[in-house]
Amino acid sequence: MTILFLDSECNSLDTEGGFIQELAWVIADTKSFRTLKVESHLIKWLTSYEVEEGAIAVTGLSREYCEEHGELAQRVFTNFLFDAGCVDFICGHNLIGYDHPMLATNVQRACLSSLERSDYAGKLKIDTLTDCPYPSNMKIHALKYLAYDHGFILSDAHQALADVFACKHLLSKYDLAEVIEIAKTPMVTLTAKIDFKNVEGRDKIKNARFYWEPNKKLWTKRIREFHLKDMQESLGADIEIVTEA
């Protein structure tokens, strides 16, 4: 069996209005994790868009640079979808929360058929952010730090191809069958409700990497349903957890 690892670098974090400026993917064998194919492309769009300052600071990619060195978006996405249709699994780091929805809007923008109507849609999506059974002492799940914790120095973080190889290295360190079982379960949103005087409980929530949403005044977290029981047990009975699909 084979697996396609992917990463995108974009002009913003807006998955509905953002533009992919760089897309890289690697196809590997799932037994040996040997690389079988490598693709890395800057993308040229036949429309104007702005790049947020924060994005330029992270990726170093301006619209002008991509126009000078990039390939037409339609060509890049066509080739990507063809390769994605030939593998058994798709994998990325923060794939479910970012790269997948960003791909969906960009494929449609490039005047191709809907991503959900392509062969890509039927592939199991593995997200190394949520689906690997990381040890509890690995508190930071940013790709750069996870890679380092697993013996991979990611010196060119936020260059798409470098991130792809870091993601591949992470997955290779775990039992793929176990990861697949986790990835088969749906993503759920957890909301933690706690008395504001419960300082110990708030510390538990923070350590479990819940995020405070000031507008909603809620602690939330996205996880695989596979981890739900362990999460509830680790937080304790004094913290109420509400689950939404």
Image (cartoon, grey):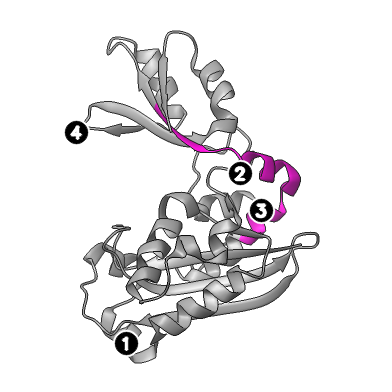
- Contact between labelled residues 3 and 2, with CB atoms less than 8 Å apart: no
Question: Which comes sooner in the sequence, label 3 or label 4?
Answer: 3
- Identify the residue position indicated by label 2 in the image: 183
| CA distance separating discs 2 and 4 | 30 Å
For marks 3 and 1 on the same chain, the one whose residue lies earlier in the sequence:
1
Q: Nearer the N terminus, badge 2 or badge 4?
A: 2
Q: Which residue is mark 3?
A: 171
Q: Quadrant of residue 64?
A: bottom left
Tell me the mark number nearer the camera, choosing from 2 and 4: 2
Residue at the (66%, 70%) spot, across then down: 86
Question: Would residue 187 be counted in the magenta stretch?
Answer: yes
Q: Please give left or right for residue 135 compared with residue 81 in the image.
A: right
Q: Residues within 10 Å of mark 3 (few under 14, many from 20)?
A: many
Q: Amino acid at mark 4?
A: Asn
What kind of residue is marked 2? Answer: Ala
Q: Which residue is mark 4?
A: 215
Could you give the CA–CA distance between mark 2 and mark 3, rounded to whole angstroms? 12 Å
Precedes in sequence: disc 1 or disc 2: 1
Q: Are marks 3 and 1 in contact (CB under 8 Å)?
A: no
User: Looking at the picture, which amino acid does disc 3 mark?
Assistant: Leu
Tell me the CA gap for discs 3 and 1.
33 Å
Task: Residue at 57% x, 39% y: name it.
Answer: 138
Which of the two labelled residues, at mark 2 and mark 3, occupies the earlier sequence position? 3
Residue 206 image offset from top left, x and y in percent: 40, 28
Q: Amino acid at mark 1?
A: Glu
Q: Are the two marked residues, 3 and 4, in contact with CB atoms closer than 8 angstroms?
A: no
Q: Secondary structure at mark 3?
A: helix
